[in-house]
Amino acid sequence: MKKFLYSLLLFFGVCMQVSPVFASPSEKEVEMLANKLGWTTNDLEEYLTFKGLKTSDFDTIQLLEKQLGTPITPTNLDQLLVQNSMTREELDILLAGFHEGVEDFWFLEDLEVAIDFYKNHEDKMLKLEKFLENIGFDDTEKQQFYGHLNRQNPALLAAKVEEWKEQLNDFQVTDQESGVNEVTNPALSAFWKDFFNTTSLRPVLIGIDDNGKRTELALTDLFLKEMDTTVAIELYDNQNTLIGDAVVTPDMVSSVEAIDKMVALTEVTQELANLYAAQLPNTASPLPVFLCIGYMLALVGAFLVFRKASYEK
């Protein structure tokens, strides 16, 4: 299940808050439900984790079972294909384009979300899939990244999103030929400082010259025209835990094309978040923080349009 869509669903799920409850299903009830599905209790807990939930979030086993959705069967799969005017072959081709297959989905509702989004946003999703591949983050780094965001203040992120979006619109209309100048340099630098502070990410930047010499840099150094060295960037949380690392060049940071990609990513992830939120039951209460998804993805990639290179630690 460690597929592209489910990586995003994990992120959307952990951005939701579950309503307080005063009871939870017993271990025996959970075990019986898992057995009914042909799972172990660990399988069940893993699936709930993908949606940012746990068994103790539910008052009764009935509510938990409702949350899980409808197990996929040949009959309801055929009905879903008819609803979407697709053949099984067409579905397999669509999912294969995103490294997915029907066997990667446990419940009909999850498959329905994937079909809806992939059918109507195929071009955007292919670009996003390619983009994520080019970032070079491995599965562990992705999980650490999503987990880090989940620990942030959602109200603060939501309040910052519109401000960031307005700034991005300003960057987007910048003359593509002008590049970084006395006006855009401070604006870009201020944006990223605010972004890192808001998301509690600490970037460590290290310049690497042609001889392999390493020099620690400040964020503002990336916006200097005369700077032409390769830069290794490491992202840490407040406990100095490494979230992920990559390699950039200064021109990647100030690229208008990269800013365009950031805006596009925000639009794509917002639409997927809306689809996912529509599948949640009444026991969950969506928070208006999904717009930050594109920015968080862009943090490690939109300004870093490259395939991550290895460098000497």
Image: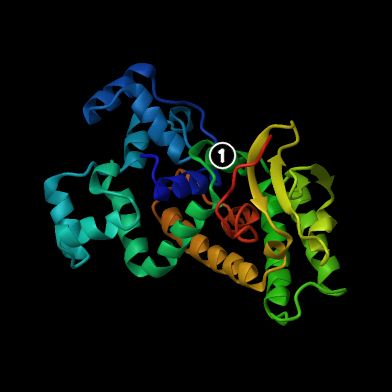
Quarter of the rendering occupied by the N terminus: top left
Front residue of 2/68: it is: 2
Front residue of 159/236: it is: 236
Residue 115 in the figure: left or right of residue 19: left
Residue 128: where, in percent of width, then height? 47, 60
Going 72% across and 79% down the picture, which residue do you hit? 174
Q: Amino acid at mark 1?
A: Glu
Residue 268 visible from this viewpoint: yes
Going 24% across and 48% down the picture, which residue do you hit? 102
Going 52% across and 62% down the picture, which residue do you hit? 270
Front residue of 247/114: it is: 247
Residue 198: where, in percent of width, then height? 75, 50
The relative height of residue 130 versus residue 63 in the rendered view (above or below) is below
The relative height of residue 241 versus residue 85 in the rendered view (above or below) is above
The relative height of residue 82 versus residue 244 in the rendered view (above or below) is below
Q: Which residue is mark 1?
A: 141
